[in-house]
C-alpha cells in the first residue's frame, strides 16, 4: 500500500473513532483517603457527701460538726451546710454553667428569724459565686479548651474529688426578742446542681 493510501486509511479510522463516541486516554491517577474516628467530649456532675457544722465564732470549739436533725438553733447561731460538687468537662469548645438551683428562702414560722445565703467555693476554699436567692451560677470550661484562659477549668471526668462546694449558711437573728420563734421550725428547700453547656455570650465565642 502506498503512503497516500496508508494516510487515508489512518485518517478514516480516526474519524470513525470520533464518530463512535470514543475519546483519547490522558494520564490520570487516584489515591485512597483514610476515614477517621470522631469522639465526643463529656459533661457530668455529681454531689458528694454533705455535712453540717456549727460555725458560731463565739464558741471555743468553732467550728464543730452537728447533726442537723438533732441540732436546736438559737438567736446568734450560725450553721453551715457544705455540699461538695464533682464536675467533669471535656471538649475543645466546651463551656458550661454550673448552677445551684431550688434553694431560696426557708419555709415555716422559724424562717422569719433566719437569714440564708448560698456560696460556691472552689477546691481551695475561695469564693467564686454567692447570693441570697435560690440560684447561684458559675461558668466553667474544660481543661482542653484553648479559649478559656479567663474561666475556671475542670478535669475531663468526675473522679470522686470535689472541684467545688455549695455552702449554705443559716444565721438566726440576735434581735429576735423575748420568746418569739421558740420551738418552731423552718424547712430548707431541697436543691440541685445543674451543669449546662453554653456557647453564646462567652469570651472567644460569638
Image (cartoon, helix red, strand yellow):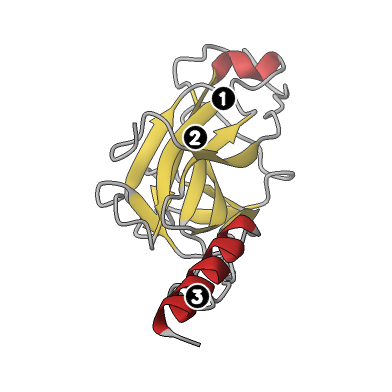
Q: Residue at x 55, y 55 (%)?
A: 84
**Helix, strand or loop under label 3:** helix
Q: Nearer the viewer, residue 168 or 62?
A: 168
Q: Which corner quadrant of the image does residue 193 belong to?
A: top right
Where does the image place residue 165, in percent across and percent down from the top left? 49, 50
**Helix, strand or loop under label 2:** loop
Task: Read off the residue under disc 2.
Answer: 77
Q: Is residue 30 above or below residue 74?
A: below
Where does the C terminus fall, quadrant-wise? top left
Q: Report the number of discs.
A: 3
Q: Is residue 39 visible?
A: no
Number of the front mark, 3 or 1: 3
Q: Earlier in the sequence, mark 1 or mark 2?
A: 2
Spatial CA span between label 3 and label 1: 93 Å
Q: Residue at x 29, y 40 (%)?
A: 204
Where does the image place residue 169, in percent across and percent down from the top left? 49, 36
Q: Is residue 86 above or below residue 171?
A: below
- For disc 3, the neighbor class at 10 Å (few under 14, some 14 to 19, many from 20) is few
Task: Read off the residue under disc 1.
Answer: 134
Q: Nearer the viewer, residue 116 or 22?
A: 22
- Relative to residue 143, is residue 195 drawn left or right? right
Amino acid at each position: 500500500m502506498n503512503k497516500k493510501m496508508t494516510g487515508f486509511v489512518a485518517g478514516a479510522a480516526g474519524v470513525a473513532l470520533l464518530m463512535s463516541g470514543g475519546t483519547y486516554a490522558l494520564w490520570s491517577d487516584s489515591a485512597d483517603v483514610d476515614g477517621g474516628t470522631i469522639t465526643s467530649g463529656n459533661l457530668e456532675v455529681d454531689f458528694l457527701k454533705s455535712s453540717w457544722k456549727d460555725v458560731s465564732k463565739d464558741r471555743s470549739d468553732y467550728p464543730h460538726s452537728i447533726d442537723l436533725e438533732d441540732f436546736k438553733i438559737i438567736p446568734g447561731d450560725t450553721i453551715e451546710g457544705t455540699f461538695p460538687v464533682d464536675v467533669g468537662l471535656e471538649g475543645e469548645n466546651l463551656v458550661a454553667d454550673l448552677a445551684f438551683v431550688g434553694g431560696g428562702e426557708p419555709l415555716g414560722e422559724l424562717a422569719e428569724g433566719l437569714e440564708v445565703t448560698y456560696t460556691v467555693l472552689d477546691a481551695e476554699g475561695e469564693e467564686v459565686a454567692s447570693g441570697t436567692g435560690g440560684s447561684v451560677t458559675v461558668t466553667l470550661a474544660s481543661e482542653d479548651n484553648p479559649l478559656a484562659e479567663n474561666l475556671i477549668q475542670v478535669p475531663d471526668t468526675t473522679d470522686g474529688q470535689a472541684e467545688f462546694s455549695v455552702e449554705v449558711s443559716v444565721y438566726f437573728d440576735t434581735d429576735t426578742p423575748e420568746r418569739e420563734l421558740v420551738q418552731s421550725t423552718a424547712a430548707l428547700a431541697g436543691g440541685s446542681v445543674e451543669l449546662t453547656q453554653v456557647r453564646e455570650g462567652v469570651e472567644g465565642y460569638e
